[in-house]
Image (cartoon, coloured by chain):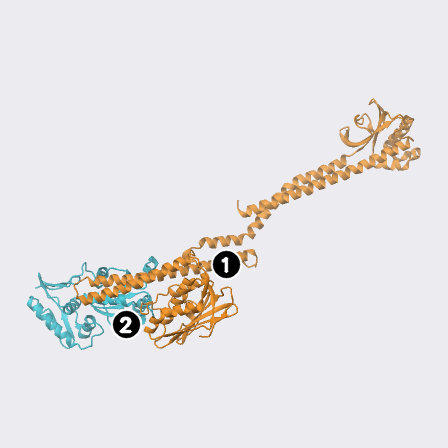
């Protein structure tokens, strides 16, 4: 079932239940009010009849005399109207009431025979229900027309039932009103429900139309047209937020997709180029016989290419392993100055070979929480980059300082620098500032993305500042190893 | 036949130059798109081999600019980009053929020959009178007798026969047979023409190459009388 129909159905069912409840309550309230009114009237009539006969329900004596006069009165009232008013002036109040609503009165003895009844009953009698004791009200019929009737047991002094007083009033008009009310309910209820369902369905349809738009746009989307976006609705409501959220999601997907595509193209270029070089060189080499020196130089060249490729595959695999997050860093306390000294010792030969000096300044005994192996790899990558892009005769400075919250280590070179617009991209895989992508510098564009990945794993922040042709500074902000920095002896 | 290779990877450019020169081509190399385009527009090449991802100006852009300048020189795309979209995009940009890296050198040679093949000809063989040459094997036959030529002699003869019945000016001969590092002393052409004539004479195909005084040389299809 569509959302639209479901909304309409739920809403209609709930409303139908409520309406039914309200209708039922109204009907029964009216019903009760109407019958209460009749019952009040009957009870008044009973008490008036009894008091007029100057007796109580417990004293049956003299009742027949009363009945004669009273019922004749009633008869006169009905037939002669107000012309005979003087004749029964003993009870004005009673007469007035009789004018409005004729009531039937009947007295039955204990064996169920009619002792006397009012003349307006004609040949009909009021129904006696012998099982009822005391005073009870119920619905009954006289000559097929509905009446409300009261039955009062007439007792003798010794408490025996000697007969019954039955008083009834016609309730036909009230029954008609109640039936009309019922009819109105039964007819209007399904109409209301039907109208409501149609209306709700219409409104629901209108209000979910923007969702249809979202669906239509999303359906049209594929990896070839990821630049499409869902049109934002006019009102800033939930659907607007849904559309905006979906668009933001699409932005991220497109971005990731682009990056992945870029990476695949770069990786394929970087991997295929050395293969093409080696393959082509060897193919040309074997086409005809050559002298020994020629063979040797070409083989050396191929070996160099192969080792470059092996190095790149290593780095790619490493990156892939780190990115799959299967490797967790073994965080421990690392004495940063000691670490840096070891590193400098290792890297110094290659730096000196290029005529570059490395100086480490660390006046404070900084201890950080890191994985020593990963830290090594990060420093090595940054430092070898610094050596690669620095001119001969320049120097590289490594500075480790303690701050209140972290240990800040910076590695500065005096190399060619990174243009500002390219600074944010240096951590991307295969990114090289020099766009030619050739192997002159021997770089692969993977080193710094490894640095970033390792830093992320160890909660180390990496940032880069640079000025073209005056050098680059990489800053690592490492977490403390629990204890605060201890001042070290000056070297 | 003179080729221009626009390729930023020195390893690839290096072996291409070595291998193609052994195949008697005159080869120039440009390591970026900009200088490659300059060379392509200022010199007359018989074929361009262009890498897609090169600095300064992409291979695609070089291709477009060359076509925009009205040149119909065959262009071979040489690239690691290998998706269908890339191939279609490259060919639509004006390239004549597309070779994916890594590639077989022999295949490259064959594709170069296809691009140099004269129109409406089923194979690569070239002939003039009783003389026929096979650019794939670098063999020259006078009737059934093979004539042995040096690479330069062969290249010169090939160029003349490819342009037979047309006058080849000395400067065009220099442009198409020698590479850019050759200083423009055109008297070297006369030396090679003399060698060629001597060898052809010995094989019974003398008088094939005629001198147009002050202009250059021409190979005429002898009338079949």
Left or right position of B109 against A165: left
Q: What numbered label is drawn on residue B181?
A: none
In the image, A185 versus A85, the foreground residue is A185
Seen in the picture, residue B124 relative to B192 is either above or below; the reply is: above
Which image quadrant for residue A32? top right
In the image, A375 versus B26, the foreground residue is A375
Residue A266 in view, yes or no: yes
- Which chain, by letter, is cyan? B
**Circle 1 crowding by C-alpha within 10 Å: few under 14, some 14–19, many from 20:** some
Q: Secondary structure at mark 2?
A: helix
Instruction: Check chain identity for marks 2 and 1: say if they share one.
Output: no
Q: Secondary structure at mark 1?
A: loop
The residue pinned by badge 1 equals A231
The residue pinned by badge 2 equals B41
Tell me the quadrant of the picture where the C terminus of chain B can be found: bottom left
Left or right position of A163 against B106: right
Which image quadrant for residue A276? bottom left
Pointer 2 with pointer 1, Cβ within 8 A: no
Chain identity of mark 1: A
Q: Colour of chain A?
A: orange
Left or right position of A281 against B145: right
């Amino acid at each position: 079932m569509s959302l639209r129909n479901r909304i309409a159905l739920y809403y209609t069912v709930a409303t139908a239940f409520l309406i039914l409840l309200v209708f039922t309550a109204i009907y029964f309230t009216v019903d009760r009010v109407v019958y209460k009114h009749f019952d009040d009237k009957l009870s008044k009539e009973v008490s008036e009849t009894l008091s007029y006969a100057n007796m109580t329900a417990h004293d049956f004596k003299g009742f027949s005399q009363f009945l004669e006069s009273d019922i004749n009165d009633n008869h006169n009232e009905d037939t002669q109207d107000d012309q005979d008013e003087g004749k029964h002036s003993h009870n004005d109040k009673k007469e007035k009431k009789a004018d409005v609503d004729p009531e039937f009165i009947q007295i039955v003895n204990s064996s169920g025979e009619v002792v006397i009844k009012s003349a307006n009953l004609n040949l009909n009698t009021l129904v006696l229900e012998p099982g009822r004791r005391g005073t009870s009200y119920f619905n009954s019929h006289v000559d097929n027309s509905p009446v409300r009737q009261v039955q009062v047991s007439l007792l003798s002094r010794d408490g025996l039932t000697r007969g019954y007083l039955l008083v009834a009033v016609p309730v036909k008009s009230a029954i008609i009103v109640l039936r009309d009310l019922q009819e109105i309910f039964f007819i209007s209820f399904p109409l209301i429900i039907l109208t409501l369902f149609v209306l709700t369905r219409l409104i629901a349809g209108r209000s979910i139309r923007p969702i249809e738009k979202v669906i239509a746009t999303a359906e049209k989307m594929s990896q070839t047209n990821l630049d499409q976006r869902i049109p934002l609705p006019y009102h800033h409501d939930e659907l607007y937020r849904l559309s905006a959220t979906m668009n933001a999601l699409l932005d991220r997907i497109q971005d990731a997709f682009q990056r992945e595509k870029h990476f695949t193209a770069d990786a394929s270029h970087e991997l295929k180029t050395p293969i093409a070089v080696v393959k082509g060189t060897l193919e040309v080499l074997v086409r005809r016989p050559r002298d020994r020196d020629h063979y040797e130089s070409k083989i050396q060249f191929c070996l160099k290419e192969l080792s470059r490729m092996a190095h790149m595959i290593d780095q790619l695999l490493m990156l892939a392993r780190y990115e799959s997050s299967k490797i967790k860093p073994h965080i421990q306390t690392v004495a940063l100055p000691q670490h840096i000294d070891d590193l400098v010792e290792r890297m110094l030969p290659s730096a000196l070979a290029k005529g570059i000096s490395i100086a480490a300044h660390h006046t404070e005994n900084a201890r950080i929480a890191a994985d020593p192996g990963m830290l090594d790899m990060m420093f090595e990558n940054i430092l070898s980059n610094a050596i690669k892009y620095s001119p001969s005769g320049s120097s590289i400075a490594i500075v480790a300082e303690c701050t209140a919250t972290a240990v800040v280590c910076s590695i500065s070179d005096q190399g060619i620098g990174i243009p500002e617009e390219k600074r944010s991209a240096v951590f991307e895989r295969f990114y090289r500032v020099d766009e030619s992508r050739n192997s002159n510098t021997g770089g692969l564009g993977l080193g710094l993305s490894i640095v970033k990945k390792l830093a992320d794993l160890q909660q180390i922040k990496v940032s880069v500042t640079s000025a073209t042709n005056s050098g680059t500074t990489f800053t690592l902000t490492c977490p403390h190893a629990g204890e605060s920095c201890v001042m070290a002896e000056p070297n | 036949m003179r080729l221009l290779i626009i390729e930023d990877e020195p390893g690839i450019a290096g072996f291409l130059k070595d291998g193609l020169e052994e195949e008697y081509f005159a080869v120039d190399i440009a390591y970026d798109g900009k200088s490659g385009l300059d060379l392509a527009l200022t010199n007359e090449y018989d074929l361009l081999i262009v890498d897609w991802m090169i600095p300064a100006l992409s291979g695609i852009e070089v291709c477009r600019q060359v076509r925009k300048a009205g040149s119909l020189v065959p262009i071979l795309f040489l690239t690691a980009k290998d998706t269908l979209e890339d191939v279609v995009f490259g060919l639509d940009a004006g390239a004549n053929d597309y070779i994916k890296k890594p590639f077989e050198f022999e295949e490259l040679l064959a594709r170069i020959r296809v691009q140099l093949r004269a129109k409406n000809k089923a194979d690569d063989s070239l002939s003039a009178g009783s003389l026929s040459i096979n650019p794939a094997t670098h063999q020259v036959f006078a009737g059934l007798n093979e004539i042995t030529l040096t690479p330069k002699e062969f290249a010169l003869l090939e160029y003349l026969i490819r342009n037979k019945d047309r006058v080849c000016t000395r400067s065009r001969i220099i442009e198409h047979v020698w590479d850019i590092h050759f200083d423009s002393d055109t008297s070297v052409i006369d030396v090679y023409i003399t060698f060629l004539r001597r060898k052809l004479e010995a094989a019974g195909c003398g008088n094939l190459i005629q001198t147009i005084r002050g202009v250059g040389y021409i190979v005429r299809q002898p009338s079949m009388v």
